Image: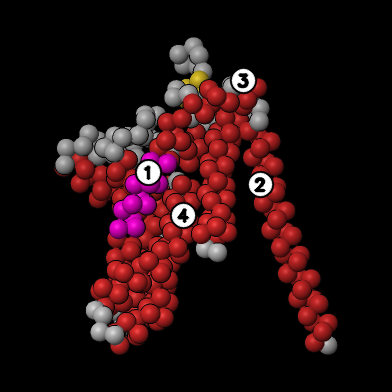
């Protein structure tokens, strides 16, 4: 009976795995199928490197260049990652090396709660708080790449804090007792032993967080300004996810505009694939 039950569970696991792979394959096929007609009208170089996006011929000529959108997606993600890492790593060190077991049990649920807040709520807070702060600081309209980066950094904090604190906590349990027995100060241990021992896992958590940042739509769209401009820190711009969300509802089905939005989504997907391949390389080469 037990062996039969094992076979049933094994078959169920294989079936669910196959369904997950088939679902991913269907998504990839659908996006590629809808994106390819774009390149019958627009060359790949013009699509990826062009800076003019005019899907409707208001001026007599359409254009489908997404270079500014690609740059904005990467720019906002990097800004958010830098800000989130500075705060998240400090919070992780506090949770793993300063707070006691009781303190961690109280604070961890609040960190997890940040991950459960809908992105539209973050976007609304950014719209009524961050944008007004930038307006008072003299930034025209208040919407800018930096505002989007700050908001996105707050959204990334739960992932970084959880991953980094767990890594540092494991290193602490391994090295701190021996270091304290030798009379080495705790903060010296943190700086010279715990962080270097944890940096590989911290690096992986950073890469995963960047992947999360690049796919964020609603919150970024609400504060970045949504203008097809090359991104600058205090200027407006528009990400790939934002342009898809804003224009897909108005695009005529089977038009070049419609297929170009799918092609933009395919580019975003390829960027995320590159990140995941990078994670695999890190696991094979760095974490061996």
* Dot 3 crowding, Cα within 10 Å, few <14, some 14–19, many 20+: few
Q: Which residues are magenta?
A: 74-86
Q: Position of residue 1 (x, y in %)?
A: 83, 88
Element under disc 2: helix
- Calculate the distance from the C-alpha at mark 2 to the C-alpha at mark 1: 26 Å
Q: Earlier in the sequence, mark 1 or mark 3?
A: 3
Q: Nearer the viewer, mark 1 or mark 3?
A: 1
Q: Earlier in the sequence, mark 4 or mark 3?
A: 3
Residue 155: name its quadrant: bottom left
- Which one is nearer the viewer's eye here, 281 or 220? 281
The numbered mark, 3 or 2, whose residue comes first in the sequence reads 2
Q: Which residue is mark 3?
A: 41
Element type where label 1 sits in the image:
helix
Looking at the image, which residue is at 66% across and 46% down?
A: 27
> In the displayed structure, would residue 198 be above or below residue 180?
above
Residue 138 lies left or right of residue 237; in this view the side is: left
- As drawn, the label of residue 27 is 2
Give the labeled residue for mark 1.
76
Tell me which label, 2 or 1, sits earlier in the chain.
2
Circles 3 and 2: CB distance less than 8 Å? no
Residue 83: in magenta span: yes
Which residue corresponds to mark 4? 207
Cα distance in 3D space between marks 1 and 4: 14 Å
């Amino acid at each position: 009976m037990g062996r039969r039950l094992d076979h049933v569970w094994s078959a169920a696991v294989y079936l669910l795995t196959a369904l997950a792979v088939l679902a991913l394959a269907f998504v990839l096929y659908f996006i590629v199928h809808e994106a390819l007609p774009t390149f019958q009208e627009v060359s790949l170089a013009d699509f990826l490197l062009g800076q003019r996006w005019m899907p409707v011929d208001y001026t007599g000529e359409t254009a489908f260049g997404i270079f500014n959108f690609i740059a904005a997606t990467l720019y906002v993600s990097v800004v958010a990652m830098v800000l989130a890492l500075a705060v998240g790593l400090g919070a992780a060190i506090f949770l793993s090396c300063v707070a006691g077991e009781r303190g961690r049990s109280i604070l961890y649920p609040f960190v997890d709660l940040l991950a459960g807040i809908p992105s539209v709520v973050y976007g609304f807070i950014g719209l009524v708080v961050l944008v007004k702060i930038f307006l008072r600081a003299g930034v025209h309209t208040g919407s800018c790449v930096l505002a989007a980066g700050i908001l996105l950094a707050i959204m990334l904090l739960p992932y970084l804090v959880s991953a980094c604190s767990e890594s540092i906590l494991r290193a602490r349990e391994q090295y701190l007792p021996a270091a304290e027995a030798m009379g080495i100060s705790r903060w010296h241990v943190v700086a010279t032993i715990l962080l270097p021992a944890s940096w590989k896992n911290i690096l992986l958590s950073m890469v995963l967080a960047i992947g999360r940042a690049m796919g964020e739509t609603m919150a970024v769209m609400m504060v970045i300004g949504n203008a097809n401009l090359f991104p600058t820190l205090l200027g407006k711009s528009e990400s790939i996810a934002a342009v898809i969300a804003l224009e897909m509802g108005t695009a005529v089905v089977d038009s070049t505009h419609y297929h170009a939005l799918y092609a933009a989504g395919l580019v975003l997907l390829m960027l995320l694939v590159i990140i995941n391949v990078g994670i695999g390389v890190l696991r094979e080469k760095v974490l061996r």
